[in-house]
Image (cartoon, rainbow, N blue to C red):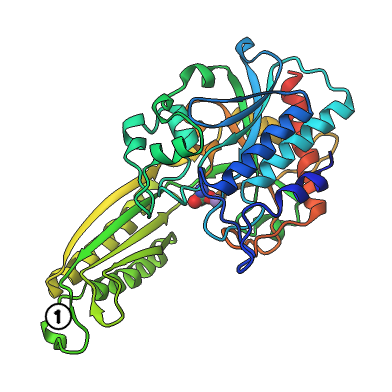
Amino acid sequence: MTFHSMWAQLLPIGRSRDSGGYRRFAWSGADADCRAWFEEQAETRGLAYEVDRNGNQWAWLGDPAAGDAVVTGSHLDSVPDGGAFDGPLGVVSSFAAYDELRARGVEFAKPFAIVNFGDEEGARFGLACVGSRLTSGQLTREQAHRLTDADGVTLPRAMEAAGYDPDAIGADPERLGRIGAFVELHVEQGRALDLSGDPVGVAGAIWPHGRWRFDFRGEANHAGTTRLGDRHDPMLSYAETVLAARREAERAGAVATFGKIAVEPGGVNAIPSRVRGWLDSRAADQERLDTVVGGIEKAARAHADSQGVELDVVRESFTPVVEFDHALRDELARILGKDTDLTVPVLGTGAGHDAGILAASIPTAMLFVRNPTGVSHSPAERAAEDDCLAGVSALADVLEGLVGR
Ligand code: HGY
Ligand code: MN
Ligand code: MN
């Protein structure tokens, strides 16, 4: 099966007719269809299919218990109205690269696997990389069981409804211990490769990043009869906080985004009783990130106090800076630059990935494929087919080097 035909199979799954974007949320029907596709790809190739205790899917060649396995893959879920490439490009390229290795007649001296990590985007339960965090022990079963979606459905109930056992979830050190190297290919979520004129690059580091929930509680009242001076309007404090986020991020050369908001009671003619906004912030280093988030919180408190509004700030998730394994990164660059004097670009990124989570436990590396506009987390996300094929070929080269070591 070619890259093109695999891509065409996935393309309609979970796509909104209205926006053209993807809504493949963890444990939903669209997610199940993507997962069925993964299983079929494994079986078509005679790879041993298994689902681990955290619902991550694996397709194995060779005996996993032999250890020092080479693993590649990514995720198939999406953000709300996401693009086609973020996640699926890595999974489809993994199967395509495996086919390429078979066509080259490569001998696999080590066990090899392709993986689809569950719930990478955290679009439904608010926490990103749930599958890899659970596996690596960075999220406990108890913490995961408390995750709840916007409709009040808990993660364990959602897993159960999708046919998985939520009581089985948790750290899986034995599984991680079998992996010698994990390589994730991903569409670039910026324009560095477009600007440098390269179809493929290697990841250097991931910025520290996190999500914070700001709960502003004021007083519900009539929008027509309450004098401005008598109001305790949490929306005003929220609005000031959004502006403060922009200011603080600009000052620090970082990024800060309020992309999700919940207003209660949500009446056009009522002052809200509560505004809940979620901040996503990322910076090149921890100190800068602390400065940005601290500055935003300070501005939010000052405004809330002036309006008689109460404020709680809760950090919902955090991922420290990730420096990818230098030896593996250099090996990738060497394999990709073979027989040429070309240097492969090494890129830092503000985007989180399962590879970044696993980097705390095992040697991991990432390949990026050029994105001509840099747009991501949007239906407008793109990569040219030639670049995708260059990505497959680069991944195959890297895997060939690793499985034959
Ligand atoms: O949000 C992120 O950085 C990632 O794409 N999950
Ligand atoms: Mn993403
Ligand atoms: Mn992704």
113 vs 311: above or below: above
The quadrant in which the N terminus is found is: top right
Percent position (x, y) of residue 319?
41, 42
Tell me what residue is drawn at x 53 percent, y 25 percent. Answer: 52
Q: Badge 1 is on which residue?
A: 231
Percent position (x, y) of residue 306?
13, 74
The quadrant in which the C terminus is found is: top right
Percent position (x, y) of residue 274?
23, 66
Q: Nearer the viewer, residue 14 or 136?
A: 14
Left/right placement of residue 41 relative to residue 78 reads right
218 vs 53: above or below: below
Q: Residues within 10 Å of mark 1 (few under 14, many from 20)?
A: some
- The amino acid on which the numbered mark 1 sits, given as a three-letter code, is Arg
Percent position (x, y) of residue 324?
55, 35
Q: Nearer the viewer, residue 63 or 318?
A: 63
Left/right placement of residue 90 relative to residue 222 reads right
Whether residue 330 is visible to the viewer of this picture, yes or no, is: yes
How many marks on residues? Answer: 1
Left/right placement of residue 213 relative to residue 396 reads left
